[in-house]
Amino acid sequence: MLDVEQWAEIRRMHKVEGLSIREIARDRNTVRAALRSEGPPRYSREPRPSKLDPFKERIHRLLKADAALPGKRIREEIEEEGYEGGKTILDDYLREVRPRFQAPRTYQRTSYRPAEVCQFDVWQPKREIPVGHGQTRQGFVVTCALGWSRAAASTLVFSKQGHDLRYGISRCLTFLGALPKTIVWDREGALHAGGGRPTEEFAAFCGELAVGWHFCEARDPEAKGIIERHQGFMETNFEPGRSFASPEHFQAELDGWEERIAGRLLRTIRARPAERLTEERERMRPLPERMPETEVRFVMRVPLQPYLRFDTNDYSLDPRFAGRRVEARIGQRQIGAVALDTGEVVASHRRSFAKGLTFTDPADQALLEKLRGERRAGPDVEVELRALARYDELIPA
């Protein structure tokens, strides 16, 4: 039997070189068949019967009743009726036949106008980030991408609490350099209050920026496919092959990477995001002079053991303010406290993302030791001194 190469050579020799059938080969019937055929030879086998064939009608009935029925349950059902085949042939068949019983879900291509939307999400790096003191910690990256220019920005945080997510949004928008009309999120618990409504804190944050918000439907990642694809690129291009020494190092590397990829030609928009961002900024609103506050603030009374606890760490307070009320201010870089009545600074520390540590300001420690020393010495009392002869006169010999 001829293979494709022999078939092609016979036709070339006859059509191009003008050779006769006899000159091409002794087996004239084979040559004639090659010249008469309209296409190259194909080899096929008669399909062999499958162990699954007797159960296909039963599978169809199960899928008609519930098109989403898991393959494991279908296998259990037909095994009770005598199926002895393997899992693979059943899975392959279900992959082909299940779409016939499901309502088709299709997607239209979405186009965005400049300055219209900015999609946000949270990406979790696979490896923990070194945070000092011999510790590592799981980080989270608030990441965003503009719908029209595809320009992206990312911010490292260490929790998915509302104040950290709002800080991430604020820093990403600052990195992009302007404000979109609407920011798009999935139903992140710290931002979404339920029913498509924002939490009070998130609504206040958006109100200060004067931007709209939109929460996607649950389990609908395709609604923000731009940022989903960007996250996938982060997983395959940013994280592999890199090591980080600190949160600051991670953020610096991430910012540099975002700037580099903004200069590449993006096939979907046939443009470079950095160039489009310049044009899109002209239609976006400028950033406010001061971004909304994202610090954690709360009022506390300075305890007798003058320390403030946050995120499992203890930070010293000025012991002279023991018993007085202060406002604690927790930022991404600094932790401080201010007296409510006088406005005096009671504490100022660099925040650490390591856990279970105690940080004592040397000035606070010196004041604490001074106060303790004064308390142990007691008050100053003048004692009268008398001559011993006076006691001799009072006590008879």
Image: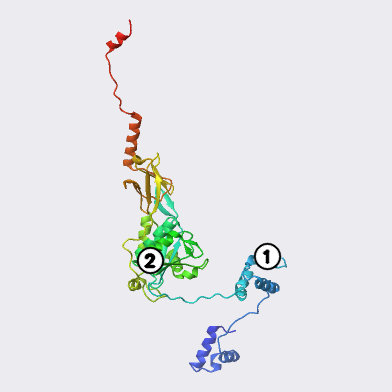
x, y percent for residue 213: 43, 66
x, y percent for residue 379: 32, 28
Q: Is residue 389 left or right of residue 70?
A: left
Residue at which label 2 appears: 210
Residue under the point 36% across and 69% down: 262
Name the kind of residue labelled 2 in the image. Answer: Ala
Residue under the point 34% across and 69% down: 285
Image marks 1 and 2: residues in contact by CB distance under 8 Å? no
Q: Nearer the viewer, residue 266 or 64?
A: 64
**For the residues marked 1 and 2, what is the alpha-carbon distance in whole angstroms?**
56 Å
Residue at which label 1 appears: 76
x, y percent for residue 167: 39, 59
| Quarter of the rendering containing residue 21 | bottom right
Residue under the point 35% across and 30% down: 376
Q: Nearer the viewer, residue 282 or 123?
A: 282
| Quarter of the rendering containing residue 118 | bottom left
- In the rendered image, the quadrant that contains the C terminus is top left
Name the kind of residue labelled 1 in the image. Answer: Glu
Question: Compared with residue 148, is residue 362 higher up or lower down, i.e. above or below?
Answer: above
